[in-house]
Image (cartoon, rainbow, N blue to C red):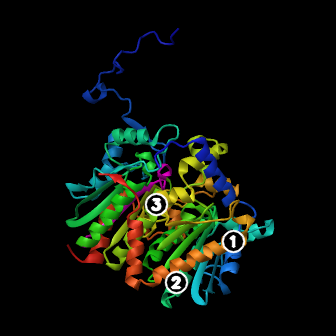
Amino acid sequence: MSWFKRERPANGTTSQPAEGARRVRTEGLWLKCEGCRQIIWRKDLEDNFNVCPQCGAHSRIDARTRLRLLFDGEYEQHDTLLTSTDPLNFSDSKPYRERLASNQGATSLSDAIISASGKLHGRLVNICAMEMKFIGGSMGAVVGEKITKAIERSHAERTPIVIVSASGGARMQEGAVSLMQMAKISSALMRLDEGKVPYISVLTDPTTGGVTASFAMLGDLNIAEPGALIGFAGPRVIEQTIRQKLPDGFQRAEFLLRHGMLDAVVPRGELKDYIARALRFFCGPV
Amino acid sequence: MSEESSGALGSRAWQAVQLARHPKRPHSLDYIQKIFTEFEEVHGDRAFGDDAAIVCGFAFLDGKPVMVVAEQKGRDTKQKLFRNFGMPKPEGYRKAIRVMQMAAKFKRPVITLLDTPGAYPGIDAEERGQAEAIARNLREMARLPVPVICVCIGEGGSGGALALGVGNHVFMMENAVYSVISPESCAAIIWRDSAKAELAASALRLTAGDLVGLGIVDGVISEPPEGAHTDPEAAARSLKDRLRQSLSELAAMTDDELVQHRYEKFRRMGTFVK
């Protein structure tokens, strides 16, 4: 039994005299902002690099969008073919190899990072952007190697490097091999430091575990996006350990800023200009 | 290393986990007392406090000066609480790098002993920058122009252990384990059941033999047949022998060669399909 006598037209539009735009399917065109709970048009959100036009809440963006945000235009990708060898022959609910293959299919990436070089406000920079959609942005041997190579390239060419972190930490499926990537990358950063080539670390939501506890905290500048979750241990682990409720805003970018762990919290819309300004300070005019 | 994890391997990994955590297993201070002479503890990070989960001090090995930096667990309840169950906080890691840099200034070798379930996951540790403290140690250990020898004597709990683990030589006691995540946490993530830790232990390949096979650890230090706790003197002797041998190997290198050697060792870690 239906409450209304008139059937809904099959194409989902109303029978109102409609403009062209109203005739398309509306499903998925509108989103609810997780910050202000307001309804926003998806295209408005995307045009604003996933920052809510109403309240400024930052939702995550993928690595490709990040590079589009930061580079002036075209960029060159490096080490695109590096893939994991599954060093532990690991299998959980499904074999790690299958998990890799399905993530590679879904993201068209070989692993959880894009390493690229291009111009940022006219200055040549290397940028590594991590991809959360690839096994939680976790760091295994491939992520470790691509970042290390990018740092070495920066050192050899004396080109500044920006690493944008978005990661749950080291990749469990590669065991101690992924743990050692922390030492490998940090050692490369020691050399970059000695070479006095600038490194800006951008921490985005979320950056935790072995990524925070290595390169993400080793920038000449460590900056974060508003509201980003940043920490060593994840909030659930801490809650289970200390058996208390965590304070509001714990491990958010603003919390870290207050505790002296970040140089600045920079909104996404200002990120590119901020980096350009910092690099002008470090390296002089382009 | 390519065979499927069998029941037998699983039990070996789990056995090592049990032995590494054995209540009677020698802890850092037990080894320090048996191996070195005139150990003098050095306290504090000069910024916040003194973390009892990391013990640092200068000492002599066969009369030669060395800096010892070690993670320390407690034996009884009171000691366990005092040592925070061997889980260091940022001030512990900052103390550790402070004394390592002091050793480097005076050209003294650094010996670290790793034995922790992990860096402490708590509100205060996060507030004071647990991640930053670990990260800085990794970078600064890479820079030390002196021999650095690291030995995992019990539990090598992820970043909490690695923060003292960037050495020219990295060894493991025969029944020590070294892993990116505890078997319990791994099992909780994969099977949503921490009781399956035994399965996770073998999947993680965390035994000394596994890590030598993966090219992460340089050698295994033998323990008495039933584990180090059955004969701590013998375990300490075999650790001491290895330290002597390692120190004499590294003594031949210049400062630059030591830094280069350490860099290349970690640079090689990880294999890929290109």
Q: Could you tell me residue A242's position as x and y percent? A: 69, 58
Decide: is A26 above or below A50: above
Q: Which residue is mark 3?
A: A211
Q: Is residue B90 above or below residue B100?
A: above
Q: Residue A229, how many percent across, how many down?
A: 50, 56
Q: Residue at x 32, y 67 (%)?
A: A151
Asked whether A126 or A27 is in front, the reply is A126
Q: Is B178 contained in the magenta span?
A: no
Question: The numbered mark 2 sits on a residue in which chain?
Answer: B
Disc 1, SS: helix
From the viewer's perspective, is the residue at label 2 or at label 3 nearer?
2
Q: Earlier in the sequence, mark 1 or mark 2?
A: 2
Relative placement, left or right, of B11 versus A30 is right
Q: Which residues are magenta?
A: A158-174
Instruction: State the separation of the CA atoms marked 1 and 3.
Output: 39 Å
Residue B171 located left or right of residue A264: right
Do dots 2 and 3 share one subunit?
A: no
Residue identifier under label 2 = B109
Residue named by callout 1: B234
Which amino acid is tagged 3? Val
